[in-house]
Image (spheres, rainbow, N blue to C red):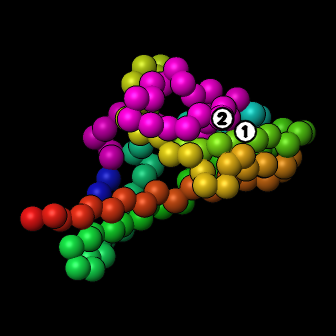
Amino acid sequence: MRFATCVIALGVFCSWSGPSSASLLTDFTEATFTGYNAIPGSNQTWGAPAVAGHISQTTSNNFVWNNTGGSTVQVYGVFVTDFGTPTLLYLAERDPNAPVSIPAGGSYLYTGNVQFKSIN
């Protein structure tokens, strides 16, 4: 699976947002630390899905955001939005370890994981 034809971006949020089905893009504060940039969806690839029972699962390549600034930053999770000047929120995921501290010179790593379950 590849999002090459979709114009989306994967970003990091630095606010204590608890994503829900009612979340809006404005509920999240996008990271601004030195070294941060949203990552285009065209850089995302997915492995072949593994199927066990009625559940299919696949993971993406790793996404890495580097803190090249001089101080520690806190991140709370990732979100997917339209690329360029974002106006839409497609999904958001709070890191289970949030807040995560990224020291100066450190990195934040995210690996996407998608599951589909057949209930027929």
Amino acid type shown at disc 1: Gly
Asked if residue 15 lies left or right of residue 91, the reply is right
Asked if residue 52 lies left or right of residue 44, the reply is left
Q: As displayed, is residue 21 above or below residue 66? A: above
Give the residue at x 32% y 53%: 2
Give the residue at x 48% y 61%: 61
How crowded is the residue under tag 1: few (<14 C-alpha within 10 Å), some, or many (20+)?
few
Q: Which residues are magenta?
A: 3-32
The one nearer the camera, 64 or 15, is 15
Q: Where residue 99 is drawn, which disc sits there? A: none
Q: CA distance from mark 2 to mark 1?
A: 21 Å
Q: As displayed, is residue 25 above or below residue 55? A: above
Q: Earlier in the sequence, mark 2 or mark 1?
A: 2
Q: Which residue is mark 2?
A: 16
Which corner quadrant of the image does residue 54 belong to?
bottom left
Q: Position of residue 102 (x, y in %)?
A: 78, 49
Q: Position of residue 90 (x, y in %)?
A: 38, 35
Determine whether label 2 and label 1 are within 8 Å by CB. Answer: no
Q: Position of residue 114 (x, y in %)?
A: 36, 59
Total labels drawn:
2
Quarter the N terminus occupies:
bottom left
Q: Secondary structure at mark 2?
A: loop
Amino acid type shown at disc 2: Trp
The one nearer the camera, 73 or 1, is 73
Q: As displayed, is residue 110 above or below residue 78? A: below
Q: Secondary structure at mark 1?
A: loop
Q: As displayed, is residue 72 above or below residue 81? A: below
Give the residue at x 89% y 39%: 71
Q: Where residue 35 is drawn, which disc sits there? A: 1
Asked if residue 110 lies left or right of residue 54, the reply is right
Q: Is residue 1 visible?
A: yes
Q: Is residue 25 magenta?
A: yes
